[in-house]
Image (spheres, rainbow, N blue to C red):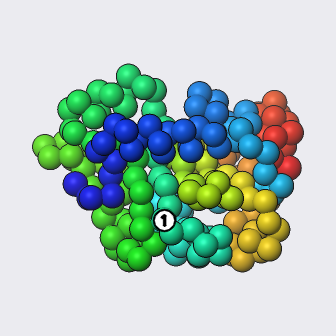
Amino acid sequence: MHPFFIKNTKELAIFQSQIYSLFHENKTLPEQVFKQQKHYYLFEEFHWVLSEEGWEMLKSLAHHHHDEFILMAVLAQPDDMNRFYEEFGYFNWLKIPLNITEDEYLSILTDYPKHSKNDSIMNIASRVVWASPTLKWAIYGERDFEICILGIDQETAGKTLGSWRPLDDRVLDWVSVVFPDQIVPDEFQKKLATHYK
């Protein structure tokens, strides 16, 4: 287990208060998952943020905002979090320093508890968030819809993010793969546009 995983319940409580000040704990897409309204919302594929390129983007975003580390959390129901902690001795919440390499980032995502290979973040996480400890930016990712949403306040930060894009047909194409006949329902599209355009 990587030392960046949170093992202490008091430390977890501090990070939970930060994360839950940014995100609605029980809301999922297409609802508004951000508690704090951001000026700009940009989208990327879920698995891309869980990649080497994703780590480079996260680091540059953190450096741009003068962050010393990145908070990362697998959002789960309290009972599921407590069960995971009781069984494995840590939470799937992390405080990731910016000096790690792409390979180390991937190693964190694929690391699993002893005797439980299927319980890595890469395998089990359905809702993941990454956030600035200063709360200047936040990313919400949902595997069920294959997308991540970055909420930021500065347009200039958004311009430096390369492949991130506003809600458009390409983003809807990413989402479409989870629906029958790869057609995104109108109601889903309308709700997504209402909250993130």
- Determine whether 141 is above or below 86 in the image: below
**Circle 1: element type:** strand
| Residue 51 position in % (x across, y down) | 46, 66
Q: Residue at x 71, y 38 (%)?
A: 35
Residue 24 occupies quadrant: top right
Q: Is residue 180 visible?
A: no
Residue toward you, 53 or 175: 53
Q: Residue furthest top?
A: 79
Q: Which residue is mark 1?
A: 69
Residue toward you, 107 or 86: 86
| Residue 79 position in % (x across, y down) | 38, 22
| Residue 2 position in % (x across, y down) | 26, 58
Indicate left or right for 113 with 141 as reference: left
Tag 1: residue type? Phe
- Determine whether 75 is above or below 136 in the image: above
Q: Residue furthest left?
A: 115
Q: Is residue 186 visible?
A: yes
- Determine whether 165 is above or below 114 in the image: below
